[in-house]
């Protein structure tokens, strides 16, 4: 699709552009290509009624990404292939050169769910942002290999097209771009990467509607601009909708439980669990055991001062809930 190709060539990843609020260079609004892209995007007229399109969803299913379509894959399993290997990773804030990550080691295999916990300011979000290539940080040492490829050699959009997805703690708005168009564009970018035919707006609606229903989101969310005027909880659901639509081999979820009421937490957790297969993995950051009751982790890691200092099972979260980080230090 010419629209996303143009946007892509200007460095705005359709998969990540909603996520980098600050310093990542975006196309200037005065750039003719950007204006062209926006005009194309606005020309795609949104449809309003999901249910009337359900009849065609079977036909579309055959063209969805088999690698990430939960209906074609099995539940999480053990002994999967190596997905992510991080060794002695150090990183600084690009502007100030202050070191935040001080030697992170983490290995994730297919089919695993990893949770990272840790005190405020210990470096959890920084670690996840460094993984996806956020421009606020510079890697100063160590390595990050994802599916056999060196992440340091890849631009943020290449990382996302390779199957790395990140849901940010505070998802940003994209004024003037509807959720439907954004999702359609991002999904088609991934399909192109996998040499699969793109979906037109009608087919895409049939594909996305069941996912909206799973997340108990109204179809109106498709017609609204990305995150514009969304409540905190709606933004979180919207992030998971993006994940459900685009799919990922490794989904990094930064505090998806924050700001969610208990029903919303269950809806989001159910949706994430529904996406888990033996071939993909989740790395989630959370402060609370309650999320881990819904999305069962294979491992829990504790981060302290820019390093993972402890790894274990759910008992770590239970000990934390009971006695705080002091209890963990004493174990
Ligand atoms: N872009 C930045 N500019 C300045 N300081 C930063 C930046 N990014 C991270 N930091 C600092 O790095 C430290 C680690 O921040 P980070 O957000 O990674 O912590 P965290 O473990 O995710 O915390 P929380 O649990 O509160 O979300 C903090 O002291 C934070 O202020």
Image (tube, helix red, strand yellow):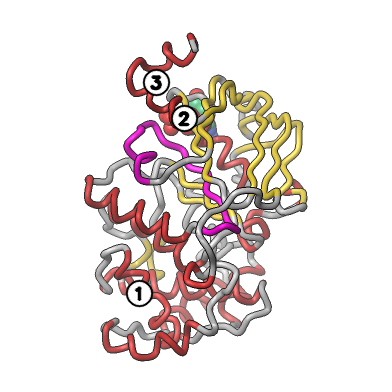
Q: Quadrant of residue 44?
A: bottom left
Question: Does the magenta-highlighted stretch encompass residue 245?
Answer: no
Vertical side of 178 occupied by 76: above or below: above
Label 2 secondary element: strand
Q: Which residues are magenta?
A: 277-294
**Residue 32 x, y percent position in the rendering:** 57, 74
At 43% from the left and 43% from the top, the residue drawn is 296
**Residue 68 x, y percent position in the rendering:** 55, 67
Task: Answer left or right for 2 relative to 261.
Answer: right
Foreground pick, 312 / 267: 312
Q: Are marks 3 and 1 in contact (CB under 8 Å)?
A: no
The residue where tag 2 is placed is 117
Vertical side of 169 occupied by 198: above or below: below
The residue where tag 1 is placed is 210
Label 1 secondary element: helix
Foreground pick, 45 / 270: 270
Vertical side of 280 occupied by 73: above or below: below
Mark closer to the observer (3, 1)? 3
Question: Which label was assigned to residue 319?
Answer: 3
**Residue 24 x, y percent position in the rendering:** 58, 50
Question: Which label was assigned to residue 125?
Answer: none
**Residue 58 x, y percent position in the rendering:** 43, 86
Q: Earlier in the sequence, mark 2 or mark 1?
A: 2
Q: Earlier in the sequence, mark 3 or mark 1?
A: 1
Label 3 secondary element: helix
Task: Answer left or right for 224 relative to 66.
Answer: left
Task: Answer left or right for 11 relative to 217.
Answer: right
Foreground pick, 235 / 309: 309
């Amino acid at each position: 699709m010419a629209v996303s190709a143009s946007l892509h060539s200007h460095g705005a990843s359709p998969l990540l552009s909603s996520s980098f609020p600050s310093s990542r260079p975006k196309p200037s609004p005065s750039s003719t290509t950007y204006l062209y892209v926006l005009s194309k995007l606005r020309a795609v007229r949104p449809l309003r009624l999901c249910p009337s399109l359900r009849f065609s969803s079977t036909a579309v299913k055959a063209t969805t990404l088999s690698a990430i379509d939960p209906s074609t894959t099995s539940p999480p399993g053990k002994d999967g292939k190596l997905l992510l290997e991080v060794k002695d990773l150090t990183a600084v804030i690009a502007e100030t050169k202050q070191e935040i990550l001080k030697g992170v080691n983490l290995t994730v295999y297919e089919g695993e769910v990893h949770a990272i916990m840790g005190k405020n300011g210990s470096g959890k979000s920084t670690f996840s942002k460094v993984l996806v290539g956020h421009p606020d940080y510079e890697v100063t040492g160590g390595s990050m290999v994802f599916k056999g490829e060196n992440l340091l050699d890849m631009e943020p959009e290449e990382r996302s097209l390779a199957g790395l997805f990140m849901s940010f703690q505070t998802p940003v708005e994209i004024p003037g771009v509807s959720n439907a168009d954004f999702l359609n564009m991002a999904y088609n970018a991934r399909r192109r990467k996998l040499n699969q035919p793109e979906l037109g707006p009608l087919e895409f609606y049939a594909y996305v509607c069941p996912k909206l229903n799973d997340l108990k989101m109204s179809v109106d969310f498709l017609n609204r601009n990305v995150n514009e005027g969304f409540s905190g909880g709606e933004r979180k659901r919207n992030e998971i909708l993006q994940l459900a639509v685009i799919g990922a081999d490794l989904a990094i979820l930064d505090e998806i439980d924050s700001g969610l009421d208990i029903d919303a937490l269950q809806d989001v957790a159910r949706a994430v669990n529904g996406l888990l297969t033996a071939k993909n993995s989740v790395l989630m950051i959370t402060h609370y055991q309650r999320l881990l009751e819904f999305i069962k982790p294979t491992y829990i890691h504790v981060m302290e001062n820019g390093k993972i200092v402890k790894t274990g099972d759910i008992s770590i979260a239970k000990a934390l809930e009971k006695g705080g980080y002091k209890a963990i230090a004493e174990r």
